[in-house]
Image (cartoon, grey):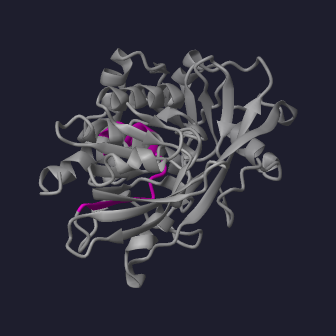
Amino acid sequence: MKFLRSFSSSALKRSSSDYSHAIIGGGVVGLAIAAELSKKEGNRVLLIEKNTKVGQETSSRNSEVIHAGLYYPKDSLKTKLCIEGKELIYKEAFRAGVEMQKCGKWIVAQTDAEDSYIEHLYYKSQDLGIKTELIPSYKCQYIEAAVRVERGVLSSPSSGIVSAHSLMDYLETKFQENDGELAVASEVIGITKNDDNSGYNVQVKSNNSQDDETININVDNVINSAGLYADKISNMLLPQERKVKYYYGKGTYFSFNASFPQVRRLIYPVPKSGVKSLGTHLTLGLDGQIKFGPDLQFVENVNDLIPFDSNLVEAHKEITRYLPHVLIQDLHPSYCGIRPKLIGPDHNEFQDFVIREEEGFPGFVNLLGIESPGLTSSMAIGKYVANIYHGSSNT
């Protein structure tokens, strides 16, 4: 692979109109799409990333959980791609040496209403072919003695944890082996559709302090996988009536600085009705270290990455519902991430992934609102996008 620290005129003059696909955004999803598209003989794939390294934003600021695919409507893209992505991680990525652990997960019910919720998830999981088990409270104390369970748990043995960076390294290596080209420190500042429908002109500015020139690249197809900035990329091209607005959901994670209690699996509360979050849950690092989070607060600034400590008391209250021995002085705000949301705090409806070739813009595939379970779904999203092009003359 020709690794370009930033675009240069000489590099692009050799093949300025020969790229079949340009992918904007080098997070885990962009890398998965790049790896998949570059498999096909004849494709010349360019991955454009505005930061100096791939995976510096949402992909490296999350729980690193491998989700089972339980929570979302059965016919949604989130369910389909989460289940498929989970299997690809456990089979393909595991064989390649990606660091992960299938530790399992409990969803803990403390009330009658929460018990009904996990029972509903159980029957739904059977329809979806996801292995789960309902465990009554009296049995739970013998399995996870530190966890408070008033009614029961839904056990999800196929849930787990994965090193996001290890997964991204694997995908980048696949892309490299397929002769893909990566341009970092390169920011897309404009996209125009060619008048003859032959493709797109992508304007890219170098973010290298020593080289601030702007380059025009002609490509057949454009994939917008820009994560937190995908709304801005989409709005560069689509007409006014089709412009989108993102809302930024900030989630703070709390480190746990104590050796007791010990837990061997992920512990989640039942999500609160009307809340766009799975709750402040317990997750594990591959080293066994416990952390809690994320909470959810909407913010205006996409770069607001200072962990909140104002929500510590509320987070501790949620945590001690299922882990009563945790002391507030052992919790410390550690890091935070921003989730790109297509609906704001005043709306409670489910929002699916948006992955589509935009009408009137052949070859332009938009990925919008790719938040959780985006990491789990990433490899399946790569295949899904590749399949969009299989039926198009723009491949």
Rendering coords of residue 351 (x, y %): 42, 62
| Residue 82 seen in the figure | no
Counting every numbered tag in the picture gives 0
Residue at x 80% of width, y 25% of height: 257
Q: Is residue 282 above or below residue 12?
A: above
Rendering coords of residue 40 (x, y %): 19, 37
Rendering coords of residue 175 (x, y %): 35, 32
Relative to residue 215, is residue 311 drawn left or right?
A: right
Q: Is residue 59 above or below residue 265?
A: below
Residue furthest toward the bottom? 241
Q: Is residue 273 above or below residue 387?
A: below
For the residue pair 307 and 272, the one nearer the viewer reads as 307
Span of residues in magenta: 363-381
Relative to residue 150, is residue 368 drawn left or right?
A: left
Taking the magenta stretch, the answer to whether it contains residue 36 is: no
Relative to residue 234, is residue 381 drawn left or right?
A: left
Q: In the rendered image, which quarter is residue 355 located in?
A: bottom left
Residue at x 42% of width, y 37% of height: 376
| Residue 288 seen in the figure | yes
Residue at x 37% of width, y 19% of height: 94
Q: In the rendered image, which quarter is residue 110 located in?
A: top right
Taking the magenta stretch, the answer to whether it contains residue 372 is: yes
For the residue pair 232 and 78, the one nearer the viewer reads as 232
Relative to residue 179, is residue 210 drawn left or right?
A: right
Rendering coords of residue 61 (x, y %): 61, 41
For the residue pair 133 and 11, the one nearer the viewer reads as 11
Quarter of the image where the N terminus is located: top left
Residue at x 80% of width, y 46% of height: 312
